[in-house]
Amino acid sequence: MLNKRGDIQQLFYSVMYMILAIFVLLILFFYVRNAASGTTLKQQILAKQIALLIDTAQPGTTLFIYRYDEKSKTYFNVDIDESAREITVSAGGGKILGYSYNFFSSHKLERSYEGAYVKIKVS
Amino acid sequence: MIVSKNNRKNKKGVLGIEMVLWLFRFLFLIAIFLGMVIVVVSFYSARIDVREVEAVLLSQSFLSCLEEQHFSTTFFTSFDAVAKRCNIVLEEGESYVNLTFYKNDEAKTTIGLTGGNENLAELCKLKTGKNLPKCLENRYYILIKDEKGKSSLVLLSINIAIAKVLKNT
């Protein structure tokens, strides 16, 4: 009886360990895939380009920025935090997996999506 | 009775060893994960430095804004007032701006306005070193109208330093 209970406990630990290992490997797989396809780098480039465009834009300007990545076939999400004056570009996963960059312009910004483009209205 | 006590002791010992073994397995998994992340980051990551462009844009923003403003005493009281009027918000601790106006009047009036992290200005004086900010110094002659509408030529010196080291290097 005691041995069986011990075995069951051992099996439970092994299964838990296997699940954790698979979970870690999956995260690793997606991370490496993202890094190798250049998505991480593209997020950084897009975030910095948009931040610089916003800094240059005068009130009344509307910016249209292409947000589709042909290689990974994903649409980048562009989020603007006006209070923190920060732009975040992510391929899903939000701020944690995305890339954020600050801009200095304090003009009012309105963000919307138009197909493969992100529209930013500066007013 | 004695036998059962020994058994209990042995079980506790086995459990302790097993716990240590599981701990090592978890640590091994974490080590593999971190190792892979470090290798991937060092192999694939690249930082694009946009601080020089940013400094130029900041300088241009101040210049174009100041050209449009009237050279009134109320406008030039503080850096924050100028920045607010020019719709510019500096990132806390990451940027430094110094605006100095040299008026070409009889009294040779000089007005200096400073905003942001002043430590960055000292770092700009260093020529070599790690994690230094990007610095820009520009001088312009600008025509500014006073409250009476009279135009006067003013030498404007703009000093800018942008740190943002983690995001750009």
Image (tube, coloured by chain):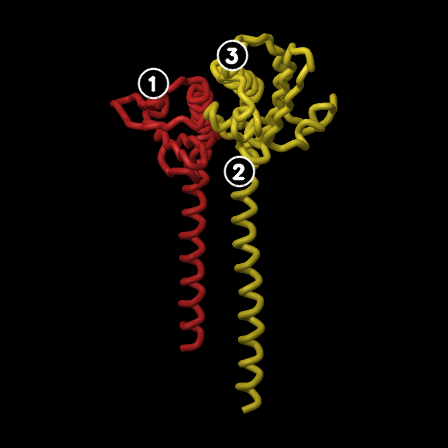
Chain colours: A red, B yellow
Residue holding disc 3:
B145
User: Which residue appears at 44% of the width and 32% of the height?
Assistant: A86
**What amino acid is found at the position of numbered circle 1 in the picture?**
Gly
Residue holding disc 1:
A60
Q: Secondary structure at mark 2?
A: helix
Label 2 and label 1 in one chain: no
Q: Are marks 2 and 1 in contact (CB under 8 Å)?
A: no
Counting other residues with Cα less than 10 Å from the Cα at mark 1, is it few (<14), some (14-19), or many (20 or more)? Answer: few
Q: In this rendering, is residue B8 above or below A28? A: below
Disc number for residue B37: 2
What is the chain letter for disc 2? B
**What amino acid is found at the position of numbered circle 2 in the picture?**
Val
Count of number-bearing discs: 3
Residue A84 is situated, as x and y percent measured from the top left of the image, at 45, 36
- The span from disc 2 to disc 1 (Cα, nearest Å) is 44 Å
- Residue A77 seen in the figure: yes
> Which one is in front in this view, the residue at disc 2 or the one at disc 3?
3
Residue B100 is situated, as x and y percent measured from the top left of the image, at 64, 19
- Rendered image quadrant of residue A122: top left
**What amino acid is found at the position of numbered circle 3 in the picture?**
Lys
Residue B21 is situated, as x and y percent measured from the top left of the image, at 56, 60
Locate the C terminus of chain B and report the quarter of the image it occupies: top right
- The span from disc 3 to disc 1 (Cα, nearest Å) is 25 Å
Disc number for residue B52: none
